[in-house]
Image (cartoon, rainbow, N blue to C red):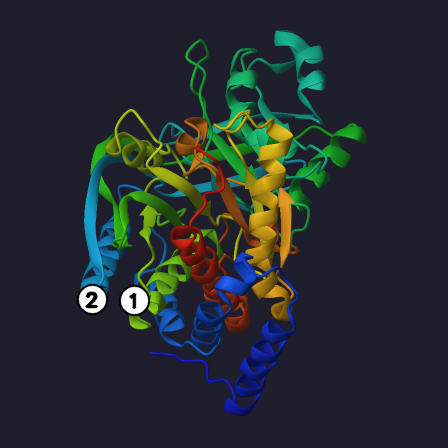
Amino acid sequence: MLTHSVPAPRWIARVLVLTCAFASVSSAQDSLTDRYRDDAGRILGAALVDTHGWEKLEHLTTVIGHRLSGSKGLENAIDWALGEMKAEGLTCYRQPTMVPHWVRGKESAELVEPVQRSVAMLGLGGSVGTPPAGITAPVIVVRDFDELDALGRAGVEGKIVVYAVDWEGYGRTVRYRVGGASRAAKLGAVAVLVRSATGSSLHTPHTGTLRYDDDAPRIPAAAITVEDALWMRRTQVLGRAMRVTLRMGAQTFEDAPSANVVAEIRGSELPDEVVVMGGHFDSWDVGQGAHDDGAPCMAAWEALTILHRLGLQPRRTLRVVLWTAEENSGAGADAYRESIGEDASSHVAAIEMDGGCERPIGFGFTLASEEGADGATKDEANGRARKLLEEIAAFFEPIDAAAIRDGGGGADIGPLMRDGVPGMSLNTVGEHYFDWHHTHADTLDKIEPTDFRRAVALFAVMGYVLADMPETLAVR
């Protein structure tokens, strides 16, 4: 197994710097910074020199690899994680649920006019396949939905629509991947090719899920590279006709059994109150699922393991969940929410990391309730929560990760947040995440071990203090 050694003197110096920095933090006598300084120092020191978490990440990405819902890879990862957690002495269990089972099959795209050449592509998750001989049709390129609608059925019917859209950030650009097939199918398109949802490309297509509308035919849909999408846009402007042959062997089978992986340190005084943290264990069927979302999962898991090794048992239960099937259904998130019953008030905080594992910078947070139970306004409740989080985040100043920002959460903790649970996201610089997102390039070599260890540290300290402190983020 590959390991990454770190020269001891540098890390010893780092821990000494942390210790000195904690001693210099000015705070009120009863602040969380003051109350948890010793415990935080122990946790940070252990996390920043830890190698065990990286070894687990190496195994997940190198030996198991990608983990699409319904696949043997995901089930192997679940079995392996539960076995390792038990060996570490953690309380853990499998939380069953059914998940989508989509298989990519063989696929290709070829430009047959005005020149003949292959077109790099990845079918979108959940897409239907083509007939065995494929689909050969003229191409019509649009820059947005307005251009598509302006063409009408007369300009779209019988054609392959190419969405050569501008990059407007992931949130706006991804809508063409998610809903573009049905929008084009309503006008008679026979297939769609979508510019990959990324701002930077080295001729790499990015997959991801789509959603079919019930009132539209289901047509094949695939992502193509930024370079090919823009080439097609320019070629159409020059008045040159294009034809493409698309072949996709995609199939959707009956839902398959899977599970969330759950591990916890049960609370010493308030075991029925829970702080939950984690990421999603599934990935797309390309690359290794390293950034999305293997490293965050391993970081949350290793954080719990370190607390267990240190003998730190918080007042409340601290739980890690490796959610299943986030990429294509949210089945794991729904199963977890259902497992805790109608009332979600047992959960005092939820932390998710699903933005890759670049250099951590801190946390985002969202209070779900409009006001505190004590009658405080939303602004007052937010201000109180921010103050508590900033006191905890002071421990991360020596590693430049003390930012507390408005707006936190994630897809897997979304069901909890909708029922009033305060939500947080572990944030990173996010400089290159969408370069690798949902591609063959999402591999372990894109992750710096130091960044990973810092994520472990943030999970461990934040999770522990939230689970142990007398107050909660949302006054109940």
Q: Which of 256 and 18 is in front in this view?
A: 18
Horizontal side of 81 relative to 374 (left or right) equals left
Q: Is residue 453 above or below residue 196?
A: below
Which three-letter amino acid code belongs to the residue tagged 2? Answer: Gly
Q: What element carries label 1?
A: helix
Q: Nearer the viewer, residue 361 or 107?
A: 361
Whether residue 50 sits left or right of residue 448 in the image: it is left
As drawn, which residue projects farthest toward the bottom? 9
Looking at the rendered image, the disc whose residue lies closer to the viewer, 2 or 1, is 1
Q: State yes or no: discs 2 and 1 in contact (Cβ < 8 Å).
A: yes
- Using the image, determine if residue 99 lies above or below residue 138: below
Which residue is at 23% across, 68% downward? 88
Q: Quadrant of residue 419?
A: top left
- The crowding category of the residue bearing disc 2, from other C-alpha atoms within 10 Å (few below 14, some 14 to 19, many at least 20), is few
Quarter of the rendering occupied by the N terminus: bottom left
Q: Residue 308 carries which label?
A: 1
Q: Earlier in the sequence, mark 2 or mark 1?
A: 2
- Give the alpha-carbon distance from disc 2 to disc 1, as whole Å: 8 Å
Residue 126 position by quadrant? top left
Residue 440 locus on image (x, y percent): 48, 55
For the question of whether residue 298 can be seen, the reply is yes
Q: In which quarter of the image is the C terminus?
A: top left
Q: Element type at marker 2?
A: loop
